[in-house]
Image: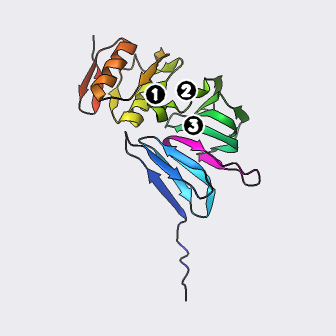
Amino acid sequence: AVQMLPNWDASYSIETAAGETRTVSLADGSEILLNGGSKIVLDRNDIRSVEIARGEARFAVKHDESDPFTVIAGEQRLVDIGTVFNVVRTDRQLRVGVSEGAVRFESTARTVELHAGDSLAADNLGKIAIAQSPVASIGSWAHGELVYDQAPLEQVADDLSRSIGISLELPSGLRSRSFSVVIQTDGDWDIVRARLEELIGEKIVADGTRWSIEAR
């Protein structure tokens, strides 16, 4: 005899520590590459639906028009139209970049179809911004690069935390300063720190995994 457990939860989560990456292969042939400091929630009863709770993930989805793959982020969701795309979810915003195919972004206020090279940022106030990016720059963290086009330093700090596991403390006056740079994340931390110092023109002091910008 088999006793059914009414409180059995079909959902389960997969997490990575800062600086760690992990590949998740799904039964339908889709693949999720998790960046550091990230968490996704999956459903054993529905492998075509994934929640990104926090962090960053690159999705390479096996398209099925009759059963679209869906990524849930709070009240927003992304519906696959046959594609490879990168998603970042923080406490401030959701960012999506499409490198192949297309994705449909759906929120309570708006629906937007994104194609290869399109990027979208949606903040917690409902503001949505759409831009175009070189396809090679989307999800470039998976290849050891962080590519920015007028991105705030606060975003750079978040990305470095996930990708290499350091915490960069920023003075309030620098958080919104924008940069267009490429940061190589390979090599040891001293090399990465030196690269970052050169790019932003500021001295960075390292104390283990805690970095801070030296006051002038």
* Residue 185 numbered mark, or none: none
Residue 104 location (% of width, % of height): 71, 39
Tell me if residue 117 can be seen: yes
- Which residue appears at 72% of the width and 54% of the height? 67
Does residue 64 appear to the left or right of 14 in the view shown?
A: right
Asked whether residue 198 is drawn in magenta, I would say no
Asked whether residue 62 is drawn in magenta, I would say yes
Nearer-N-terminus badge (2/3):
3
The three-letter amino acid code for the residue at tag 3 is Asn
Please state the total of marks drawn on the protein image: 3
35 or 104: nearer the eye?
35
Nearer-N-terminus badge (1/2):
2
Local SS, label 2: helix
Does residue 31 appear to the left or right of 205 in the view shown?
A: right
Give above or below for 34 relative to 166. Answer: below
Is the Cβ of the residue at disc 1 closer than 8 Å to that at disc 2? yes
The residue pinned by badge 1 equals: 145
Local SS, label 3: strand
The three-letter amino acid code for the residue at tag 2 is Ser
210 or 133: nearer the eye?
133
The range drawn in magenta is 54-74
Does residue 163 appear to the left or right of 64 in the view shown?
A: left
Residue 146 location (% of width, % of height): 46, 26
What quarter of the picture does the C terminus occupy? top left
